[in-house]
């Protein structure tokens, strides 16, 4: 059992996507009061650097790029996050489900410290507390605050409670199924039967450490929808403004939805997951990624595709629409009229 007390030295991710050196933060109130102001030091999801370096490395440092709202550049960041998420899920799949770490009030040790959240929520809180000092957030940094360009329209959009919920309830059980079943086989061989057979290998520290990586990467990916929306809006404000003024969610969703982009993404994701899941030995044929390795590979490939198709893409689009619905907040009639006349004639 690896329950090291040294928390993961990950770089924090702040889902308000203030273009810091990393590019976003997300806060989640552990007390279950729902999403907190993402500026506040509650429970942001953290981001770890990508595990693989794509051929065309896109800078994620908004201080360095000359067109931070280029839709191609934004999409390349989303593409690279696919690698981070897949590799993190492969890491998590090594351990059993360990459902205890997602339940509140089951660790007496945490209750004795006055902490009412789950083991995972404790990890998120403690890591965030440390990273706040490392200037992952605007409050309580040891270093002087960074000054960075205002790219997004002010907003309080934070869907981390939904991310944490679907991740712990739907993704973890599926991704860890193989490790859980092989653990049960081992336990039965030792005469351990019934509820004690399943789900718990005691690796709470390792599992939670990886969970933090996964939810941070998913949070960044989903909240990047704000940049996507700002990019599409600034390209052709007139296309969006009437629907924003009429609060027409469906019309806005139809405008931001790009079926061909989604279709290609899911195909790419299946290839990546199938390739990354393969056990590569010295004599292994160069994997082409077309193999359907479910059942043999390191991860449930269909599970990864389902994560995007059923959760990540829909939630990203909800963030895009929500961002648009508040894009005119506080603007005068004149300012809106001026926006309506703007058009940068690029593909929205
Ligand atoms: C992110 C975008 O907006 C929408 C959401 C997508 C996603 O979450 O993968 C893909 C295409 C669009 O339907 C985009 O246009 O790139």
Image (spheres, rainbow, N blue to C red):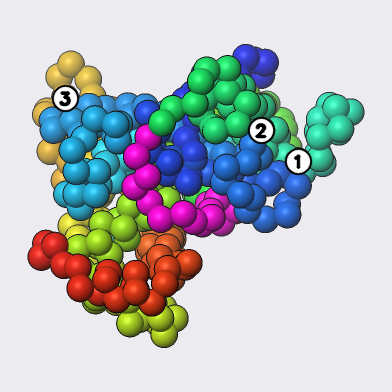
Provide the residue designation for mark 2.
125
Residue 117 in view here: yes
- Residue 301 falls left or right of residue 169: left
At mark 3, the secondary structure is loop
SS majority, magenta: loop
Which numbered dot is residue 80? none
Which residue occupies the foreground of this view, 125 or 109?
125
* Residue drawn at 85 percent across, 27 percent down: 113
- At label 3, counting other C-alpha atoms closer than 10 Å, the crowd grade (few under 14, some 14-19, many 20 or more) is few
Q: Nearer the viewer, residue 90 or 324?
A: 324
Q: Looking at the image, which is closer to me, 147 or 113?
A: 147
Frontmost of labels 2 and 3 is 2
Q: Quadrant of residue 324?
A: bottom left
In the displayed structure, does residue 143 sit left or right of residue 78?
right
Indicate the position of residue 254 as horizontal and vertical percent values.
29, 77
For disc 1, the marked residue is 117
Q: CA distance from mark 1 to mark 3?
A: 45 Å
Q: Residue at x 60, y 31 (%)?
A: 139
Where on the picture, by quarter, is residue 285? top left
Q: Give the magenta-colored segment's residue range.
A: 148-164
Mark 2 neighbour class, 10 Å CA radius: few under 14, some 14 to 19, many 20 or more: many
Dot 3 corresponds to which residue? 284
């Amino acid at each position: 059992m690896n329950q090291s007390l040294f928390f993961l030295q990950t770089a924090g991710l702040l889902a308000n996507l203030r273009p810091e050196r990393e590019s976003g933060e997300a806060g989640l109130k552990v007390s279950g009061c729902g999403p907190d102001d993402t500026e506040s030091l509650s429970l942001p999801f953290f981001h770890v650097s990508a595990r693989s370096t794509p051929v065309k490395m896109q800078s994620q440092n908004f201080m360095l790029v000359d067109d931070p709202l280029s839709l191609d550049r934004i999409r390349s960041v989303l593409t690279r996050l696919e690698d981070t998420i897949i590799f993190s899920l492969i890491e998590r799949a090594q351990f059993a489900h360990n459902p205890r770490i997602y339940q509140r009030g089951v660790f007496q040790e945490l209750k004795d410290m006055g902490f009412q959240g789950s083991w995972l929520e404790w990890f998120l809180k403690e890591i965030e507390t440390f990273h706040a000092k490392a200037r992952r957030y605007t409050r309580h940094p040891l270093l002087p605050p960074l000054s960075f360009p205002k790219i997004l329209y002010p907003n309080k959009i934070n869907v981390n409670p939904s991310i944490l919920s679907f991740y712990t309830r739907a993704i973890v059980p599926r991704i860890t199924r193989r490790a859980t079943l092989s653990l049960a086989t081992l336990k039965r061989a030792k005469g351990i039967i019934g509820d004690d057979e399943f789900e718990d290998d005691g690796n709470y520290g390792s599992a939670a450490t990886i969970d933090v990586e996964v939810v941070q990467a998913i949070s960044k990916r989903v909240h990047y929808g704000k940049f996507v929306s700002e990019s599409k809006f600034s390209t052709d404000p007139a296309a969006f403004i009437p629907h924003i003024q009429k609060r027409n969610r469906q019309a806005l969703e139809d405008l931001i939805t790009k079926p061909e982009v989604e279709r290609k993404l899911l195909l790419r994701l299946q290839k990546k997951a199938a390739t990354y899941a393969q056990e590569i030995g010295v004599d292994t044929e160069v994997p082409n990624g077309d193999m359907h390795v479910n059942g043999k590979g390191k991860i449930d490939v269909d599970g990864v595709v389902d994560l995007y198709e059923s959760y990540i893409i829909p939630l990203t689009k909800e963030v895009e629409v929500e961002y648009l619905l508040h894009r005119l907040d506080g603007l005068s009639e004149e300012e809106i009229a001026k926006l309506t006349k703007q058009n940068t004639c690029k593909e929205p």
